Image (spheres, coloured by chain):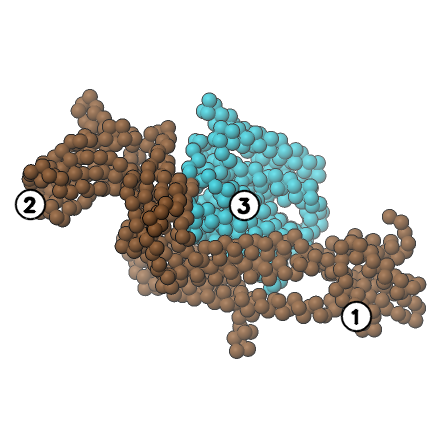
Chain colours: A brown, B cyan
Amino acid sequence: MTALWQLFRSVKLALILIILLTVATLLGVSIPQQELPGDGKFAAWGAAHPNMARWVQTLGITEVFTSWWFGLLVVLLFLNTLVCTIDQVKVLRKRREKVPLTMANPRLSLPVADGKEAVNKAVQYLTENGYRREMATCFAGKDVTVLCRSRLGDWGSIVFHGGLLVILLGVLTSVLVNMKGAVELTEGQTFVDTHENYFQIEESLLYPERHSGFELTLKKVEEEWDESENNYMARGTVEIVQDGEIVRKVEVDRAHPFTYQGMKFVLAKQGYTLVLDFYNDRGQLVRKYHINFDRSVVNGRVKHSKAFSLEDFGLTFDAILFPDLRQLPNGKFINGSTQPKNPGLFLMVSSEKGFMGSQLLLLGGEIKVDGLKVEFAELNRWLGFWVTKDWGVPVMVFGSWLSIAGVAVLYLLVPRRVVVSLERTENGDVLDVSGAARLHPHLFERELTGIKRIIRGESW
Amino acid sequence: MIQVDVKTQVLLLWVAVGLYAVSSVLYIISLVFRKDKVKVWARVAVVAGLLPHSAAILLRWIAAGHGPYLNRFEVVMSDVWLGVVLFLFIQWRYRKTELLGAVIMPVSFLVLGYGVLSSPEIRTLPGSFQTYWLVVHILFAKLAYSSCLVSAAAAALYLIKGRVERRKARAANLWHALPDLDVLDDLSYRFAGLGFLFIGVMIIAGSIWANQAWGVFWGWDPIETWSLITWFIYGIYLHLYRIHGWKGHKAAWLNLLGLMVLIFVLFGIGYIYTTNHAGYTN
């Protein structure tokens, strides 16, 4: 146990771990990772560098940040920091019980007529200048008084490392207790908080899944267009209903997410929702279908397209939306902007039998396929939310501020200790004054000059 | 109207680049040929360069309606400005630190010249940028760059002075104007410590902002990851310096490595990676 403690209290181990983490992070950022957003990167890189990719896969460094060994390094660093911090507290306590070594080499040595009075004068001067008596003892035949200023500074490093520990705890909590999900809502639509209603949902090992069944209704979506008329900022009004009662009404945009029951809803996507009405050969409405269009930029142009299948009808559709359909003099159709000024829909229908037809529809237009009439009924807006509940975040934020406070204390409050000692010799009393301050030896010039003048009775 | 403003900004920045280049040459002459008067003229050139530089930033701020931090042109002009201001402050606060300019000013004029060559197009502030966490994030990124630059300048001069002193050739006379090796080492350590703190705050504020904007605290984005690597490097440096007594030579080299990585993070990542910070790196 002692050997283990000794191992973990070593700063050398901390250095080795930080260096290993640096190397691992460098590897992770240099080699395309399989598990990172933008999947497919590794495959593309592997195709370009097949030999290197084989090596990388053999070494298992394609998922560095989620690998067991990266996690192990973080856990070891956590234990190391914890033990080092406890050790630092111990060292600090012991140091306060010891006479500082600086007295072995006095910076100021003055023969004085009345030793006791000189000590009192020196102590009084230092007390008036913000020092506090820390210790008064007899050491090596001398009367020693230790005074200290900015003692809090001793704690800077400990608070900083404590903050790091809290951050690492937060990371661990975040890994074990979190949920991530996605919700897509069309204008007017209501989402009910149950597991299956999430568009995507991932819950970690220890996440206590409790869906309270609250409802979110997207009441309306407003748009703020930029000068190009291609980009807009969407602002949604969301109503939250719990147990049949409206509990909140929130405005949400990309800069202003909202939180409910600890779940954070961040507006991440926006776009158009196409509503298609399906009528049978008797003219009865048999199905109303909502399609959320993805927005992509191809060759600098905004494109809204989607392919989807309707299994009950056995049909596959390829749809391209033209929010602002314009016809050129040569008869070609183009999209003027992404504002819904004159919505047009190019619909291509196919089935197992093959291609069945295509048509460019304006709002209210229809296409007939296989005994069905499909009508371009409405064009609405949809908003996509990332939903997260992460218990580690507040812990990490707290730890971050704690570590910053620690560094600030470390830098701004430099503890200064002055040792005033009196030696009685055959030739009379000698007053020795020495000081110690981390990295700032020059800080004592003022104190030493002041004491010299006070003892000699000089005026300022 | 905005077109005219952009042209004026670019012109003012080129004047600043020119004056910073002049000051670089003067600082180097002063250092090598032991000309004290030249040092004064070098400082005059720095202050003279800072005036059009400040004016360009002010004009940019007014024209864009937001701080200078949205694209490379803006990021570079404000980072270099803060670096130069910090250098002037250090000259005023610490004795015999004028010749740090022999390192700081060449880096400043080269980086600013590189920045002016990028697109000066004004961009609208996206919605997700309208949070005070972003201000904290950006401010501390700039402070980190400035502190690490000063720290590396002290480290570089430490290495140069140490080398000349060891050779004992012309040393005592030629390098008298520089602070003592101990002082350079201490300066380098202290500003690296500040840089470490500022990088830490920058990463934390950026994470909190990311969590607000995208619901993700940490996404291993290349810039995030490389910032973490930079932070680790300065962490290693500080531990080695404080606890293992790695003062002087070895510490100075590690310090310079830290600055190189930081410059890569600030200006080089966009050339290699696709990143969430594309707006700023492009």
Marks 2/1 same chain: yes
Please say if A387 is above or below B117: below
Q: Chain of mark 3?
A: B
Res. A137 mark? 1
Q: Position of residue B160 (x, y in %)?
A: 62, 50
Q: Amino acid at mark 1?
A: Thr
Viewer-proximal residue among A290 and B233: A290
Residue A77 position within the rendered picture, expressed as x and y whole percent measured from the top left: 49, 65
> Which mark identifies residue A353?
2
Please, which chain is the residue tagged with disc 1 on? Answer: A
**A263 displayed left or right of B133:** left
Q: Residue at x 19, y 27 (%)?
A: A332
Q: Residues within 10 Å of mark 1 (few under 14, many from 20)?
A: few
Callout 2 crowding tier (Cα within 10 Å): few <14, some 14–19, many ≥20: few
Identify the amino acid type marked 2. Answer: Lys
Q: Residue at x 24, y 35 (%)?
A: A379
> Dot 1 lies on which element?
strand
